Image (tube, rainbow, N blue to C red):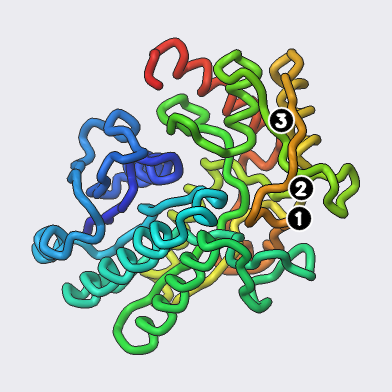
Amino acid sequence: MTVLVTGGCGYIGSHLVWALADRGETVVVLDDLSTGFDWAIPDDVRLIRGDIGDRDLLDRILGAGEIDAIVHFAGSIIVPESVVDPLKYYFNNTVKSRELMAAAVRHGVKNFVFSSTAAVYGNPTVIPVPEDVPLLPVSPYGSSKAMTEIMLRDTAAAHEFRYAALRYFNVAGADPKGRTGQSTKGATHLIKVACEALLGRRPSIEVFGTDYATPDGTGVRDYIHVTDLAAAHVLALEYLRREKKSLVANCGYGRGFSVLEVLKAVERVGGGALPVIFGPRRAGDAEAIVARVDKIHAHLDWKPAHADLDTIVGHALVWEETLMRRNRV
């Protein structure tokens, strides 16, 4: 059977496409290429350029009956932007996801893996945060993802349909084989921004907020290597096919690093000093969020291979250097 990957030319999506291709899975990618790149996926993977909200297109793709699973990455992901333009996020992340789910139900696609986020938790009072706490997002981005999770839950209750909602914490790093990485121009991921600043591709890096109730006053996050995250998706897909049950699970390592600790790691690994500017907090940013990870380990037998901050930074730096040599972005 075949896996449809929406947003498969993007950062995380392209890593999963490579992981599935490495396993011999047949993959079809649906991407509008608004932030992704066609060169980020294997040459022999079929790419359909289009919108996940296009009902006719979805019917053509799913109507052939070859697709048995959907892995859904397509959407908008920038928290501050979601605060300024919430309707964009509710349209791209929630309304269009509803269209994709409806197409899956129409055409009998029973397995659905969803790219969710730790932003659904907001500012949790329990750290590390387990999956069963109330969802109290503090940004439209987090709310748009939480709404999609609710739709998945209710769809699974009404139809022969199961899903895995994987709540990502802070994704970073790049493919150790150098095949893909975070390539979006103007990306806001901390480690990518810091690597670009270290290599002179940005004039500086701004730290947003130094007055949080954390050890050094900056926000604390759980950073996960993108290759380990892709592996979790493969295992989640196997789980849905085998167990025929739904799953909601955090994707992180269960430990947090502050913004300043991450910047020190970039300086340590890269052997240089970062041009840092300190600024006020951004709307929608949580103070500290770290994953409780016993559930993903128990259900998926997930064994991360790159759970080390310096390794994550090292792979991210190598990818930035690769982009510079290729003059890609």
Residue corresponding to mark 1 = 287
Quadrant containing the C terminus is: top left
Name the residue rendered at 76%, 63% in the picture: 128
- Residue 84 on image: x %, y %: 51, 53
Instruction: Inspect this view and state whether residue 145 appears.
Output: yes
**Residue type, label 1:** Glu
Looking at the image, is mark 1 or mark 3 earlier in the sequence? 1
**Residue type, label 2:** Gly
* The residue positioned farthest toward the right in the image shown: 215
Q: Horizontally, is 220 left or right of 107 in the view?
A: right
Q: Are marks 1 and 2 in contact (CB under 8 Å)?
A: yes
User: How many numbered discs?
Assistant: 3
Looking at the image, is mark 2 or mark 3 earlier in the sequence? 2
Q: Horizontally, is 58 left or right of 175 in the view?
A: left
Residue corresponding to mark 2 = 219
Near mark 3 (Cα within 10 A), the count class, few <14, some 14-19 or many ≥20, is some
Q: Horizontally, is 139 left or right of 327 in the view?
A: right
Residue corresponding to mark 3 = 310
* The residue positioned farthest toward the bottom in the image shown: 158
Task: Say which of marks 1 and 3 sits in front.
Answer: 1
Q: CA distance from mark 1 to mark 2?
A: 5 Å
Circle 3 SS class: helix
Looking at the image, is mark 1 or mark 2 earlier in the sequence? 2
Name the residue rendered at 58%, 31% in the picture: 192
Q: Tell which of 116 and 250 is nearer to you.
A: 116
Q: CA distance from mark 1 to mark 3?
A: 23 Å
Circle 2 SS class: loop
